[in-house]
Amino acid sequence: MSAILLTGGAGYIGSHTALALLRAGFDVISIDNYSNSNDEALKRVQKLAGRNLQSLQMDIRDEPALTALFKQHRISAVVHFAGLKAVGESTEQPLAYYDNNVAGTITLCRVMQQAHVKRLVFSSSATVYGDAKTMPIAESAPRSATNPYGQSKLMIEHILEDLAASDPAWSIALLRYFNPVGADKSGQIGEDPNGIPNNLMPFISQVAVGKRTELSVFGNDYPTKDGTGVRDYIHVVDLADGHLKALEYVQQHTGIDAFNLGTGVGYSVLDMVQAFADKNKVPVPYRIVARRPGDIASCYADPGKASQLLRWQAKLTLDDMVQDSWRWQQQNPHGYQE
Ligand code: NAD
Ligand code: UFG
C-alpha cells in the first residue's frame, strides 16, 4: 500500500494531521529534522491512534537521503509542513529562512519530480495577503509580504505555480492557514514553542499556568471593535481535517489551487483573553502595551472556496479552542520535555 509522506510531521500541525491520517486508515511516513519539535509528539500520536507510522530524522535539504526515501517507499502524495515560522527571527536570519523554506521546497520538489510523485499539499499562510485592504480575504486577493518569513511563503507559492504550469501532471494545493490554535482533545499533543512564545494562544496559556506573569496586549488603538488586533483563530483539529480533504482533492484534480483554511470569524485579543479566562475559570492578567511592529489590525478569511471545492468547513468553536489549549498546557506544563 502506498503512504502519505509528511515533512515536518513532528511539529504542531504535522502531528495533529498525522493523527487524523492514521485514524482515517492511511499509512504515514514522517520526516523531520527536529529543529523545532520532539519525536515524543509522534510517539504519542501512535498511542492515540493505536497504529504505527514511520518516523525518520531527515532534513528536506538532504537530497540524497530524500531520493533514497522515495526509492524505498511507495509514496502517493506529500504534505509539506517543514519550515521555519518565526516572523521576528526571519528578519534577523533571512538566509536561514530562505534556505530552509525556499531551497528546502525546491529540493523536495526536484526529488518528487524524479520519483514521479506529483501530488503535493503545501502549508502556506494568510501572511501571503500582507496587509489586506478588504475583509474577509478571498483567495483572489492581492498577495504581498512584509517580512522574510512571509516572503519565503510567497516565493514558494510562485515556484509551485510555475512548476504546475510546466507540467500538467502536478497536482498541488496551497493551504493558506489563518491562526491555528488548540490541541487534540486528549491533551496529549499540542503546540510546544521554544522559549518565549511569539503567538497569542501559547502566551495566554503560559500566563494562566503561572509560567509568565502577564500577557502584553500589543496595542488597543487599532480600528477594531475594542481596539485590539482581530484574527481568524482556527482549531488545529479542524485544520488537520482540512489536509485530509485537500489530499482527496489532489487525488482527483490536477493543476494548482489555493485554499483559505479559516473559520471566517474574527476575534480580538481581548475576546481571546476573556474566553480563555471565563471558560477555564482561570485568571489571565494582561497589560496594554505598544503595538508590535509589523502587526496588522484585522485578518480573517472568506472560507467559501474550501467549503465549495474541498467540502471542508471548520466545526469547532472558540470554547473548544480555549479549553483544548488549556488542557494541553495543564497536562504538559513543560511541553514534551517532562
Ligand atoms: P512547527 O515548527 O511546529 O512544525 C514545523 C516542523 O518542521 C518542525 O517539526 C521542524 O522541526 C520541522 N522542520 C523545519 N525545518 C526542517 C527541515 N529543513 N527539514 C526537516 N524538518 C524541518 O510549525 P507548525 O506550526 O506545525 O507549522 C507547520 C507549517 O505551517 C510551517 O510551514 C508553517 O510555516 C506553516 N504555518 C504555520 C502557522 C502557525 O501559526 N502555526 C500559520 C501559517 C502557516
Ligand atoms: N498578540 C498580543 N500579545 C502577544 C502575542 C500576540 O497582543 O503576546 C496579538 C497580536 O498583536 C495579534 C494577535 O495577538 O493582534 C495574534 O498574534 P499572533 O502572533 O498569535 O499571530 P499573527 O496573526 O501575528 O501571526 C500568525 C502567525 C504568522 C503568520 C500570520 C499570518 O504566527 O506565522 O499569522 O498568517 F504569518
Image: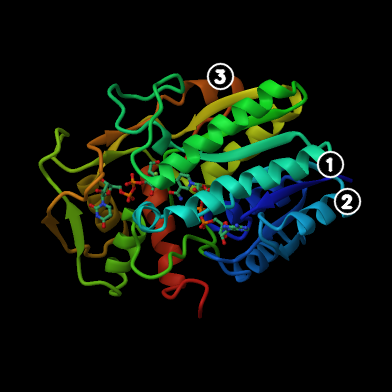
In the rendered image, which quarter is residue 266 located in? top left
Secondary element at image label 3: helix
Q: Say whether residue 308 is visible.
A: yes
Residue bearing mark 3 = 308
Residue positioned 14% across, 33% down in the render: 223
Give the label, 3 or 2, closer to the camera.
2
Which is more toward the observer, 51 or 17?
Answer: 17
Residue 71 - label: 2
In the rendered image, which quarter is residue 297 located in? top left
Residue bearing mark 1 = 115
Secondary element at image label 1: loop
Q: Amino acid at mark 1?
A: Ala
Report the Cα–Cα distance between label 1 and label 3: 32 Å
Residue positioned 42% across, 49% down in the render: 320
Q: Is residue 199 above or below residue 111?
A: below
249 to the left or right of 307: right
Disc 2 packing (10 Å; few <14; some 14–19; many ≥20): few
Q: Amino acid at mark 2?
A: Lys
Report the Cα–Cα distance between label 3 and label 2: 36 Å
Disc 3 packing (10 Å; few <14; some 14–19; many ≥20): few
183 to the left or right of 61: left
Which is more toward the observer, 25 or 8?
Answer: 8
